[in-house]
Amino acid sequence: VGASGAIAGILGAYWLCYPHSQVTILLWIYVIVRTFEIRASWFLGIWFARDIFRVSVGLEGNTAVWAHIGGFVFGTCLIIPFTPPGRSNREPRFRWLERSGLIRK
């Protein structure tokens, strides 16, 4: 699969664990540079849909788009057994990430 497929798997797990968290996006168009925040679920949904679109119209080029798709689906499926039933998606599932400072509450 490679590194990009593995990272896609982590993104798939993040999509299920923290769908309501905000991510900061850097928009860079020529000399215009802006940042804005968007929900992680929206960003990852758009990212996944873009890869599906690229495969469906044959625009994958030299990028291993199938590895991205497979990694994302695998990461999403693999994290399910580790998430306790009945938990709110707004509540972080892994408190140690907050304590370590890797994520903000």
Image: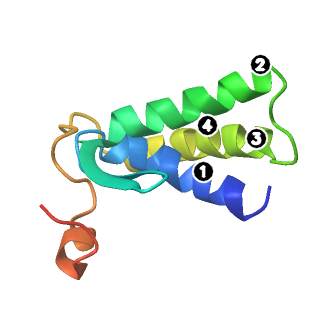
Task: Give the distance between the C-alpha atoms of the residues marked 3 and 2, in whole angstroms.
Answer: 11 Å
Is residue 38 depicted above or below 10 in this figure?
Answer: above
Q: Work out which quarter of the rendered image holds the N terminus and state it.
A: bottom right
- Determine whether label 3 and label 2 are within 8 Å by CB: no
Between disc 3 and disc 4, whose residue precedes? 3
Query: Would you name the residue on which mark 3 appears?
Result: 65
Foreground disc of the pair 4, 2:
2
Task: Give the distance between the C-alpha atoms of the residues marked 1 and 3, in whole angstroms.
Answer: 10 Å
Foreground disc of the pair 1, 4:
1
Between disc 3 and disc 2, whose residue precedes? 2
Q: Residue furthest bottom?
A: 100
Residue type at mark 2 is Ser
26 or 82, nearer to the observer: 26
Residue type at mark 4 is Val
Foreground disc of the pair 1, 2:
2
23 or 89, nearer to the observer: 23
Query: Would you name the residue on which mark 1 appears?
Result: 8
